[in-house]
Image (cartoon, rainbow, N blue to C red):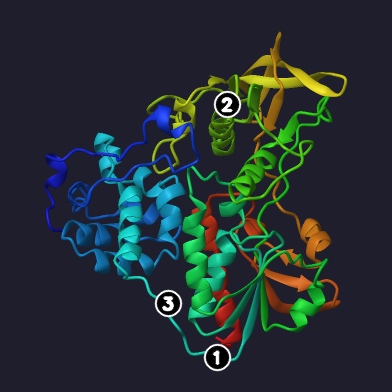
Amino acid sequence: MGNPKAFLTIHRQEAGYRPLHERVSDFGEVEQTLNSHDRKLQASRCMDCGTPFCHWACPIGNLQPEWQDLLYKGKWKEAYEVLENTCDFPEFTGRICPALCEKSCVLKLSTDEPVTIRENEAAIVETAFREGYIIPKHPVRNGKKVAVIGSGPAGLVVANQLNRKGYEVTVYEKHEDVGGLLRYGIPNFKLNKNIIERRVNLLKQEGVIFVTSTEIGKDISAKDLVDSNDAVCVCIGAEVPRDLPIEGRNLKGVHFALELLSQQNRILAGHTFDKDELINAKGKKVLIIGGGDTGSDCIGTSNRHGAVSVNQIEILPKPPVHDNPDTPWPMYPQVLKTTSSHEEGCTRRWNINSCRFIGENGQLKAVEIEEVSWEKGENGRMAMIPSGKKEIVEADLVFLAMGFVHPTQEGIIEQLGLAVDNRKNIAIDSRAAASTAKVFAAGDAATGASLVVRAMAGGRKAASEIDAFLSNK
């Protein structure tokens, strides 16, 4: 390492967020950046720790110490080349990854001041784009064709990896634009869609073919797709949100979180919606059910709409603020997370169960909630204990942000006509009524809902398996 003792004198410095009063009035990215000098100082804090737990914790196996050292020395191009070897799209992970690496950084474990790995990663890739280090690559074609169903993070990684190995890759997307969750599930204030466009345009220049507004199993039969390609990779994500089937669920004003988020992203892209379709929180009392990142995104979006009030409830207990003895390293620390959206204004409550939605003339007016507690049963599992303490919370809009149901083989068969074996990343074409190893799965379609970075790791794994299969390795 260039300066193995820098961590002793230089403290962690985050770029922070744009001023609150400024950012809540637009959908621009909230996160700021450091100047090049301060960024190199932050990279110098990466110590010669011997065993880089950051690398171990990263789903895609980033070589953080190597590119931190190059960044510290001002070798931006070399730093990007090392980063690109393991991460297909650092501009995505550098913005939205929860930084599993930082949770395992030796400086996190010892002083609670981890290296700013995620921010440094974003700085490297943005410099690479700005300075022209990233140029289209044109591999020699091998004559084989691969179809990718879904253009989310897993699908884009599969396409990128196989395209660069010489395969002719066609990506099919049922929506009007490419990006999947990145495009429709993540607000612009976390990931500006120009960042996606920049990468997609590069992939197109390199030879990847994108076919949008095309649904497999509807516009193109799964059998035809399998028959016309040497391999197919299913990357359709985990698309079924977890519902809350309580009284009043059908009232107008109760929505899944992604109904709000995807519509808002489409509006920012220039789409228009009829009055009856439009979901807008302006002047309304908003209740968000679910305490995770998706719920946080609904908070930020509602505040930008001009909501009168925003409440977020979570059925589980409030996590500890700093350290959690129940989740020691190397487990992911289950501690209280306060996002930029939380800072913009909301009331948060924990140990709250939703009992029923209350309406008038078909329109949501309130939600009955109940305080609960949690106890460990004889089987070792936590059980929810109702308290009987109920109350009515006024609400004009409710957004359900409770995660997604794990995709099933039956669900994928119904959607695509393909039976996917999630254990082996290999599928059987049920319509052909014959066993085939031509169909693979990656990302949330194979593992269930998870992180973008894990979907990207799954995409790399599937691409490697497809290449081995088609190369007879």
Q: Name the residue type under label 1.
A: Asn
Q: Residue at x 77, y 83 (%)?
A: 227
| Position in image of residue 274 (x %, y %) | 77, 41
* Residue that label 3 marks: 136
Out of 344 and 43, give the one closest to the viewer.
344
Q: Name the residue type under label 2.
A: Gly
Q: Is residue 173 left or right of residue 275?
A: left
| Position in image of residue 454 (x %, y %) | 52, 55
How many labels sit on residues? 3
Q: Is residue 38 above or below residue 281?
A: below
Q: Residues within 10 Å of mark 2 (few under 14, many from 20)?
A: some
| Position in image of residue 124 (x %, y %) | 31, 59
SS under mark 3: loop
* Residue that label 2 marks: 306
SS under mark 2: loop
Q: Which mark is residue 142?
A: 1
- The Cα atoms of the two marked residues, 3 and 1, are separated by 18 Å
- The Cα atoms of the two marked residues, 3 and 2, are separated by 42 Å
Q: Residue at x 27, y 55 (%)?
A: 51
Q: Residue at x 48, y 50 (%)?
A: 192
> Of the residues tagged 1 and 2, which is closer to the observer?
2
Q: Residues within 10 Å of mark 1 (few under 14, many from 20)?
A: few
- The first of marks 3 and 1 along the sequence is 3
Q: Is residue 201 above or below residue 351?
A: below
